[in-house]
Image (tube, grey):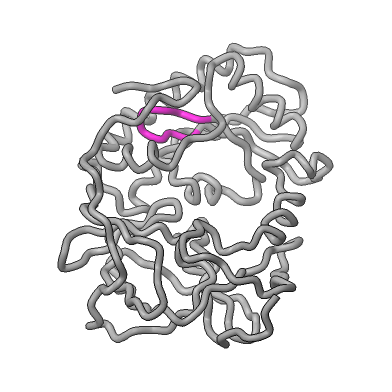
């Protein structure tokens, strides 16, 4: 535990909604605010002296970390182990809230060479698809949480659809995402196969059409190929560049050295301040390895 901390604005991560994406912040007094990240906008930030746990959200309310725990620069998340464990205890993904009374939808998410199945609270709309960086999606049904879980398991077992896709595979798909029409055809074909299964009770089928998410991200059909990737941040570094694409929790920024990929999970919890727009990028970077085909996921591959 530490009682000495820098009073500063600290980002908690990217937040997707129906209208776009914003970078969410905790103010020095614990208020939660958000700043939009429009395509073409300038990101100019100065990294402060420390990185602290951002706490957790409980029933829609932010709860600060009781220990104000310090977070290592290399950590991919701004939560300490204790806060992450508490958050998982309330997570639908870990099946600890099967009594959740909300309506849940079953969806297909297209990630380039693989389509996954998942569930999300219907009230969240497309946010779950956008925050995971799905290129296109299709909603299959809606109903109770337990029936949604059973339907998800059915599609995994019967059609071989995975329930998770690795980050490396998602990023590889952005190099050559193909066309919206090709992804829509693949999703429609899988939906037709799913319709022939013995669907669990408690889920009503929907007649939704495939939705292409790439325009929201700013991802062109020709793909996006970064030449650099930002390393874990260090105190005193500057982050700068124009936002040309934002997808999942990744940002793609222009820089004098070339297009740069930035995993915003590395940003969470740092004390940050605004830098002048002309401030150069001084954060350390690593050259991105040449594109290669990632190892296959366990599940259904959709090849074009």
Q: Nearer the viewer, residue 198 or 233?
A: 233
Q: Is residue 119 magenta?
A: no
Q: Is residue 10 left or right of residue 39?
A: right
Name above or below for residue 275 compared with residue 248.
below
Residue found 64% across the figure and 62% down from its top: 80
Residue 122 versus residue 198 in the image, above or below: below
Residue nearest the observer in this picture, 269 or 174: 269
The magenta-colored residue range is 109-116
The percent coordinates of residue 63 (x first, y second) are: 72, 70
Whether 124 is drawn above or below 197: the answer is: below
- Quick check: can you spot residue 22? no
Q: Residue at x 41, y 21 (%)?
A: 301
How far across and down, in percent of the image, does residue 132 sit? 49, 46
Q: Quadrant of the N terminus?
A: bottom right
Quadrant, the C terminus: top left
Q: Is residue 112 magenta?
A: yes
Q: How many marks?
A: 0
Question: Is there any visible trace of residue 85 in the rendered image?
Answer: yes
User: Which residue is drawn at the image coordinates 35% and 46% (left, top)?
Assistant: 214
| Residue 188 image offset from top left, x and y in percent | 45, 24
Q: Residue at x 40, y 57 (%)?
A: 263
| Of residues 297 and 120, the one drawn nearer to the viewer in this rendering | 297
Snapshot quadrant of residue 140? top right
Describe residue 153's horizontal placement relative to residue 86 as left or right: left
Give the image quarter of residue 42.
bottom left
Whether residue 39 sits left or right of residue 133 in the image: it is left
Where is residue 291? Give x, y as percent.
23, 38
């Amino acid at each position: 535990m530490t009682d000495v901390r820098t009073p500063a604005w600290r980002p908690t991560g990217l937040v997707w909604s129906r209208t776009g994406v914003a970078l969410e912040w905790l103010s020095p007094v614990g208020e939660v605010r958000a700043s939009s990240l429009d395509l073409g906008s300038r990101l100019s930030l100065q990294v402060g002296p420390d990185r602290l746990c951002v706490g957790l959200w409980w029933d829609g309310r932010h709860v600060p970390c009781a220990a104000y725990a310090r977070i290592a620069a290399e950590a991919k998340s701004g939560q300490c182990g204790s806060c992450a464990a508490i958050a998982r205890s309330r997570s639908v993904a870990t099946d600890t809230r099967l009594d959740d009374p909300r309506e849940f939808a079953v969806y297909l998410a297209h990630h380039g060479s693989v389509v996954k199945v998942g569930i999300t609270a219907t009230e969240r709309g497309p946010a779950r698809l956008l925050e995971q960086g799905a290129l296109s999606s299709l909603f299959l049904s809606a109903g109770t949480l337990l029936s949604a879980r059973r339907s998800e398991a059915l599609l995994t077992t019967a059609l071989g659809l995975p329930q998770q896709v690795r980050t490396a595979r998602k990023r590889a798909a952005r190099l050559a995402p193909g066309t919206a029409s090709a992804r829509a055809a693949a999703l429609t074909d899988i939906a037709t196969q799913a319709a022939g299964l013995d669907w669990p009770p408690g889920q009503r089928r929907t007649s939704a059409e495939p939705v292409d998410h790439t325009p929201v991200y700013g991802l062109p059909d020709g793909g996006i190929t970064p030449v650099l990737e930002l390393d874990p941040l260090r105190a005193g570094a500057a982050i700068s560049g124009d936002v040309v694409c934002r997808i999942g929790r990744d940002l793609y920024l222009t820089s004098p050295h070339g297009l740069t990929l930035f995993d915003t999970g590395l940003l969470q919890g740092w004390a940050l301040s605004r830098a002048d727009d002309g401030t150069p990028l001084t954060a350390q970077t690593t050259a991105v390895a040449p594109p290669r085909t990632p190892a296959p996921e366990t599940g259904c591959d959709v090849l074009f």
